[in-house]
Amino acid sequence: MIRRLVVLVAVTWPAASGAVAAALPGDQTIQHEEVRQVMGTLAAVRVWADNVPVGRAAVDTAFAVLVEVDSLMSTWNGNSPLSRLNRAPVDQWVPVGPDVCRVLAAAVELSRLTGGAFDPMVLPLVRLWRFQGGKATLPAAADLAAARALVDVGALAVEATRARLRRAGMAVDLGGIAKGYALDRAAAAMRSVGARGGVLDLGGNLLVFGVGAGREVAVVDPRHPGQLVLTVPLPAGAVATSGQYERFVTIEGRDYGHILDPRTGWPVPAGCSATVIASEALWADALATAVLVLGPEAGLALLERLPDVEGVVVVGGDILPTSGLMTTVPDQGP
Ligand code: AMP
Ligand code: MG
């Protein structure tokens, strides 16, 4: 049996949205949890607070932040500042605001750090593979080459509140990093209204703080997403899992996952997942995407080089953790 296993990375939460409020035994702190649909996925926010009004305010403020970040950075919403940047004439500065610029700047930094495995300019490839709708077919080599040529983070310029793209057809996708940023901001907002702790879970990204910390987190089996494959301790901070089982298109009977290798233009092979633990959810989110692209060897080597970052790659039947990570294989008995 796994004790204190309270949070499941990359496992869907109860489908019904609802609220649960309960007093913790031996503790006057109120625990309150809600699940809502946001950022194209289910988000669960749990709070510990001194009383019910503070708990409810913290949960509401967290969801308000998630909705706001989505409205700023979604490429599905044609009115978002990011979509306006993607539509703007070449070389024109677009006022996108400080939040979008912060995430753009972080994405550029992550792209450099990961040797381009993480690249926020992947949207032309994402569109080519029809991850944003349309009938998916295997792209022609010429179309792949043309889209790949547009994936160049050097052509994205970012200032404090505005950004610009240097070539026609270029477009930014923050889908690999925005959820993490949203969680960092939501947790800060919860603290600012008096929350004593929280657990926030958003589409494979998890952040815990305060009295919510000190948990174990389970990682699902990328080949059998209904099953758990290992647990890792999470004292406080963020953990993110990327895997090709989360979202895919089917072409000629084969599934192709939504994470693309910018070097080849092709989706990363399925059956693998990358989990990253870091103090900030933005970093965990982007690094998990990057490690999936880099593969176990280069991906784990990158994580080993970064201070205060741990992770684990699950590939085939193998569990490959960084040297500083304690993993436990859960007892799946009856
Ligand atoms: P995640 O679930 O955090 O790994 O993010 C996956 C999403 O990031 C995809 O649905 C795309 O929108 C985007 N994406 C795909 N490939 C990459 C990549 N190589 N670098 C950055 N973002 C990517
Ligand atoms: Mg990510």
Image (cartoon, rainbow, N blue to C red):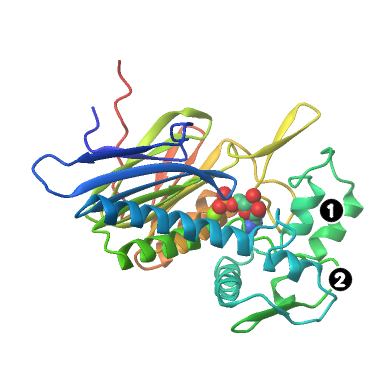
Label disc, if present, on residue 168 of the rendered structure: 2
- Asked where in the image residue 232 lies, by quadrant, the reply is top left
Position of 66 with respect to 197 (left or right) is right
Look at the image and tell me in which quarter the C terminus lies.
top left
Look at the image and tell me in which quarter the N terminus lies.
top left
Query: In the orientation shown, which residue stands out farthest toward the left?
Result: 26
Visible in this render: residue 157?
no
In front: 300, or 221?
Answer: 221
Graded by Cα atoms within 10 Å as few (under 14), some (14 to 19) or many (20 or more), the crowding at tag 1 reads some
In front: 43, or 67?
Answer: 67
Q: Amino acid at mark 1?
A: Leu
- Asked where in the image residue 217 lies, by quadrant, the reply is top left
Q: Residue at x 66, y 81 (%)?
A: 162
The residue under label 1 is 144
Q: Residue at x 54, y 40 (%)?
A: 272
Location of residue 175 in the rendering, given as x and y in whole percent from the top left corner: 61, 56
Location of residue 269 in the rendering, given as x and y in whole percent from the top left corner: 64, 41
Graded by Cα atoms within 10 Å as few (under 14), some (14 to 19) or many (20 or more), the crowding at tag 2 reads few
In front: 208, or 243?
Answer: 208
Visible in this render: residue 21?
yes
Compared to residue 89, the image places residue 314 above or below, namely above
Location of residue 289 in the rendering, given as x and y in whole percent from the top left corner: 56, 54
Earlier sequence position, callout 1 versus callout 2 = 1
Position of 20 with respect to 125 (left or right) is left
Q: Amino acid at mark 2?
A: Ala
Q: Mark 2: which secondary structure?
A: loop
